[in-house]
Image (tube, helix red, strand yellow):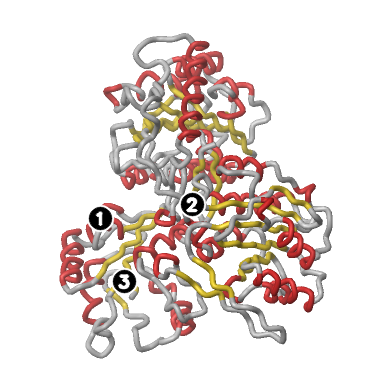
């Protein structure tokens, strides 16, 4: 149903009984159906009478309504909630998805429960895998496949699984694999040296993401890495904790890929005979898994590949294959079952669709639930420099270094603080629960231009996407500046993320000169005060975004930043299109290379969000499955 002032029945249960039929009907929806009105109450009223009728509704099937909107409700909110209540009383499950201009709090009142209400600041974000997967998890939390199906059975629903094999001239033994949480896993990688360094790093980051969801620290999972042509990068026995494996993967470089010929037969033989051995860390009674990654068609003969497949099966080694940009998948289809083969058009798709592989292997979903204790009992909580007593700049920076050192030790002792679990896949983990008082200092001078100022505002909203504002952990304030500074809202002005987003959208562009000094002074002396919402027991962070060097009060700019830092405010400085970063370096906290960021164009701000979060959270951040996985180093 599409709705504006009233509902419009577009596709009902009887019109399209196949997935392709539904897709075709959706494609035919005309843009003329768009309208400014958004009367969700009337639409909910019509749902039951138009769709869930005796002739259309199945009595044995659950009834679900997913309400998707990018606008606030046009009619009275009470009417919408009333209609939702009527549906729930009739046994309906209601899921709400708000985008951009939707009222997140309003939609929570409509959903069957708050966990069934979702919000995205943009359609782009809503279309990403992590967001849609989160909706799907609520839509169908008990999704499972009958054990007789060749499709993978989730570990939670079956104590064991059968990995079926293709029928060939040479019979291949059936491997019965335990779906327990323990496994010895080897990555066998062929990367064509003609590929770009960016593509290589995309692959390495993907391998890191698979390690991060596996319980290495408790010895449930071991990993080995092999690059073809006898390059045993590390064996199963070499690393026994997650941090060490991530560090090792970080040292991998494209120089390891020296051949564009892919001899898959030799790869399989090397891994079987020289990696899955007790001497190199293979454990008895633990599932053995080989995952082959390749962007090149193999040169191995089919019969030899089949022979290696048989030997792997005899050794109870299950083979999964990931092909990237392959036109010919015959070789991978020979060594892997159909259900164990995933393909990608290019390396960039690993980020969007790589979770397919993760879902196939239960052992890579075994990390413990995140601990609720942020630090050991004998560790003194880090204090915010400058709180309680005045210190000079040098003493403050020493305190900051000591604080980070304490945090690093805490992280080393609590390695699972910043990890992701299957239950929270697609949600931000790690920094989401951190307490923070955060002020954005935004340049609105003439050189920025209004279109770029809008991109700057989008950056701020993106930055806050995973911040826990509604729960009270994060408070946000914004000040903009040109000839003078203009406080848009204080730390205690808004307590709801939706209100913060609306306020950001309403920030006006004020052209003029560049008076960064006054904006920094206002940030320090007016905004980070108790009267305007600053909390004494919470870290203060400022994010300064500018495209130019100060031309008003320029001599005061760096001293104002130094004074702010001396009072315990940590400053991240972001420069756009700057040829001279001397002033920007003077604004940022020390060390500069961790707190100053530079991009050439405003359109690059969105990608910068993850780098700033990495520094802010003191953790290693990678963007996978459209979510942030935060892993403490």
Local packing at callout 2 (Cα closer than 10 Å; few below 14, some 14-19, many 20+) is many
Q: CA distance from mark 1 to mark 2?
A: 25 Å
Q: Nearer the viewer, residue 257 or 277?
A: 277
User: What secondary structure is found at the residue carrying circle 2?
Assistant: strand
Q: Quadrant of residue 521?
A: top left
Does residue 511 appear in the picture of this structure?
no
Q: Residue at x 38, y 42 (%)?
A: 371
Q: Between disc 3 and disc 1, whose residue precedes?
A: 3
Q: Residue at x 38, y 63 (%)?
A: 137
User: Residue 431: x and y, percent?
Assistant: 43, 39
Instruction: Provide the residue designation for mark 1.
Output: 106
Local packing at callout 1 (Cα closer than 10 Å; few below 14, some 14-19, many 20+) is some
Looking at the image, residue 605 sits to the left or right of residue 16; the answer is: right
Does residue 188 appear in the picture of this structure?
yes
Instruction: Provide the residue designation for mark 2.
Output: 627
Q: Nearer the viewer, residue 542 or 382?
A: 382
Q: Between disc 2 and disc 3, whose residue precedes?
A: 3
User: Residue 591: x and y, percent?
Assistant: 58, 23
Nearer the observer, disc 1 or disc 2?
2
Q: Nearer the viewer, residue 497 or 232?
A: 232
Nearer the observer, disc 2 or disc 3?
2
Q: Between disc 1 and disc 2, whose residue precedes?
A: 1
User: What secondary structure is found at the residue carrying circle 1?
Assistant: helix
Q: Residue pushed farthest bottom? A: 55
Instruction: Provide the residue designation for mark 3.
Output: 3
Q: How many marks?
A: 3
């Amino acid at each position: 149903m599409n709705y504006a002032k009233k509902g419009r029945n577009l596709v009902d249960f009887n019109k399209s009984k196949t997935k392709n039929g539904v897709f075709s009907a959706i494609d035919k929806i005309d843009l003329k159906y768009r309208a400014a009105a958004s009367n969700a109450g009337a639409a909910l009223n019509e749902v039951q009478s138009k769709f869930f009728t005796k002739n259309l509704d199945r009595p044995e099937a659950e009834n679900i309504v997913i309400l998707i909107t990018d606008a606030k409700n046009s009619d009275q909110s009470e009417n919408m909630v009333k209609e939702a209540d009527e549906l729930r009383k009739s046994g309906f499950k209601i899921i709400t998805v708000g985008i951009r201009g939707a009222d997140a709090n309003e939609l929570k009142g409509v959903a069957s429960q708050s966990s069934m209400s979702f919000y995205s600041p943009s359609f782009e974000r809503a279309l990403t895998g992590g967001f849609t997967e989160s909706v799907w998890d609520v839509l169908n939390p008990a999704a499972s496949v009958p054990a007789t199906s060749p499709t993978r059975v989730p570990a939670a629903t079956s104590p064991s699984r059968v990995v079926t094999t293709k029928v060939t001239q040479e019979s291949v033994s059936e491997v019965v694999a335990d779906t327990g949480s323990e496994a010895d896993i080897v990555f066998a990688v062929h990367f064509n040296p003609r590929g770009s360094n960016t593509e290589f790093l995309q692959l390495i980051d993907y391998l890191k993401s698979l390690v991060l969801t596996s319980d290495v620290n408790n010895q449930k999972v071991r990993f080995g890495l092999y690059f073809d042509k006898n390059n045993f990068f590390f064996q199963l026995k070499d690393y026994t904790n997650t941090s060490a494996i991530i560090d090792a993967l970080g040292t991998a470089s494209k120089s390891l890929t020296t051949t564009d010929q892919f001899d898959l037969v030799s790869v399989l033989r090397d891994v079987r005979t020289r990696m899955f051995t007790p001497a190199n860390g293979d454990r008895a009674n633990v599932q053995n898994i080989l995952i082959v990654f390749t962007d090149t068609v193999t040169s191995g003969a089919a019969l030899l590949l089949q022979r290696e497949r048989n030997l792997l099966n005899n050794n109870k080694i299950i083979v999964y294959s990931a092909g990237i940009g392959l036109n010919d998948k015959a070789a991978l289809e020979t060594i892997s079952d159909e259900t164990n083969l995933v393909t990608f058009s290019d390396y960039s798709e690993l980020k969007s669709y790589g979770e397919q592989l993760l879902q196939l292997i239960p052992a890579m979903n075994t990390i413990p639930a995140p601990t609720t204790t942020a630090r050991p009992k004998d560790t003194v909580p880090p204090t915010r420099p400058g709180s309680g007593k005045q210190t000079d700049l040098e003493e403050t920076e020493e305190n900051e270094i000591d604080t980070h050192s304490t945090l690093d030790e805490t992280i080393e002792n609590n390695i699972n603080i910043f990890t992701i679990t299957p239950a929270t896949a697609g949600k931000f983990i790690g920094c989401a629960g951190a307490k923070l008082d955060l002020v954005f200092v935004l340049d609105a001078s003439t050189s920025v231009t209004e279109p770029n100022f809008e991109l700057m505002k989008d950056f701020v909203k993106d930055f806050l996407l995973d911040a826990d504002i509604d729960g009270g952990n994060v408070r946000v304030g914004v000040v903009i500046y040109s000839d003078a500074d203009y406080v848009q809202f204080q730390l205690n002005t808004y307590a709801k993320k939706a209100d913060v987003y609306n306020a950001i959208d309403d920030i006006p562009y004020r052209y003029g000169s560049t008076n960064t000094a006054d904006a920094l002074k206002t940030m320090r002396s007016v905004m980070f005060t108790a009267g305007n919402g600053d909390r004494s027991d919470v870290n203060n962070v400022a994010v300064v975004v500018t495209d130019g060097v100060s031309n008003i009060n320029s001599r005061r700019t760096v001293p104002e930043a130094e004074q702010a830092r001396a009072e315990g405010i940590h400053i991240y400085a972001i420069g756009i299109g700057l040829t001279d970063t001397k002033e920007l370096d003077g604004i940022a906290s020390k060390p500069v290379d961790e707190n100053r960021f530079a991009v050439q164009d405003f359109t690059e701000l969105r990608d910068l969000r993850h780098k700033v979060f990495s520094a802010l959270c003191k953790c290693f951040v990678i963007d996978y499955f459209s979510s942030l996985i935060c892993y403490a180093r």
